[in-house]
Image (cartoon, rainbow, N blue to C red):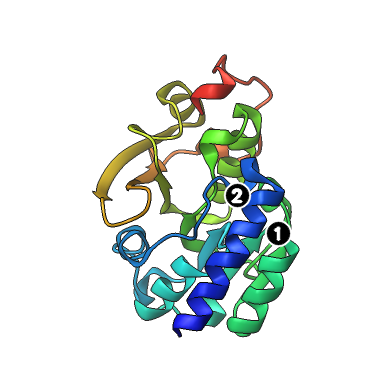
């Protein structure tokens, strides 16, 4: 197990060297962050979509909380990470693709997901890409489903103006200093689950004026 972890850390570091903006961290998420970001999810949640699972730290935490591999869809852009995920979690559906294209893929054969767990570095992405990711995620979820996003920053990585534009709201559910670097987790939901959220119908034509370095 220790050798596997060392191999994962080394592989993660190499991926960061190749594309630091996309990977954003030099080491995979630790157990404390994995426990926090999955703390509100259980087998009763239903299908779960994971965005940017990397080495599978959150994936293992989800399975430990009772989520079946068959109820997991792992959306991973890096082909090396995707191949490793498919090997370690053969029961899950692993898709090697950009998370911004999620709205184009029916990952669970028509079943909506109960939650989305994101390990994506939203802070390093332009607003248009963040919007595409959020619209795809909420299109694939139940009306009362939630997206869980972690950040190393001091505030929610999705600016309030962008959240309002998409009909979403965010709440900080906790933080951990045990992770390297320290991280916080936010729960993002539809502001009005009973209404048709703008993010359920696709990427909005009008993009709010949000500086790229604030997302």
Q: Position of residue 109 (x, y in %)?
A: 66, 70
Query: Quick one: label 1 or label 2, which is nearer the N terminus?
Result: 2
- Badge 2 crowding class, 10 Å Cα cut-off, few under 14, some 14 to 19, many 20 or more, is many
Q: Secondary structure at mark 1?
A: loop
For this view, does 47 lie left or right of residue 108? left
Q: Quadrant of residue 163?
A: top left
Name the residue nearer the viewer: 184 or 182: 182
Q: Position of residue 103 (x, y in %)?
A: 67, 50
Q: Secondary structure at mark 2?
A: helix
Question: Is residue 111 visible to the viewer in this orientation of the structure?
Answer: no
Q: Which residue is mark 1?
A: 78
In the picture, the quarter occupied by the N terminus is bottom left
Question: Is residue 39 visible to the viewer in this orientation of the structure?
Answer: yes
Q: Image height check: is 141 above or below 109?
A: above
Residues tagged 1 and 2 counted as in contact (Cβ below 8 A): yes
Residue at 57%, 55% (x, y): give it.
140
For this view, does 174 lie left or right of residue 24? left
Q: Position of residue 172 (x, y in %)?
A: 28, 42
Q: Name the disc covering residue 181, or none.
A: none
Q: Which residue is mark 2?
A: 23
Name the residue nearer the viewer: 67 or 195: 67
Residue at 57%, 14% (x, y): give it.
209
- Badge 1 crowding class, 10 Å Cα cut-off, few under 14, some 14 to 19, many 20 or more, is some
Give the spatial CA distance, label 1 vs label 2. 9 Å
């Amino acid at each position: 197990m220790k050798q596997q972890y060392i191999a994962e850390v080394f592989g993660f570091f190499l991926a960061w060297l190749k594309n630091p903006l996309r990977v954003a961290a030099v080491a995979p998420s630790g157990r404390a962050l994995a426990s926090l970001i999955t703390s509100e999810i259980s087998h009763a949640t239903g299908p779960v979509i994971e965005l940017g699972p990397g080495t599978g730290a959150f994936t293992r935490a989800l399975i430990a909380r009772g989520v079946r591999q068959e109820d997991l869809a792992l959306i991973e852009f890096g082909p090396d990470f995707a191949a490793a995920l498919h090997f370690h979690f053969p029961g899950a559906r692993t898709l090697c693709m950009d998370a911004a294209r999620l709205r184009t893929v029916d990952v669970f054969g028509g079943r909506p997901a109960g939650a989305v767990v994101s390990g994506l570095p939203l802070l390093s992405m332009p607003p248009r890409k963040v919007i595409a990711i959020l619209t795809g995620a909420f299109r694939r979820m139940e009306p009362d489903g939630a997206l869980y996003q972690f950040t190393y920053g001091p505030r929610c990585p999705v600016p309030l103006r962008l959240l309002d534009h998409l009909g979403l709201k965010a709440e900080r559910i906790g933080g951990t200093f045990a992770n390297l670097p320290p991280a916080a987790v936010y729960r993002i939901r539809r502001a009005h689950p009973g209404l048709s959220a703008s993010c359920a119908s696709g990427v909005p034509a009008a993009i709010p004026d949000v500086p790229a370095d604030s997302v």
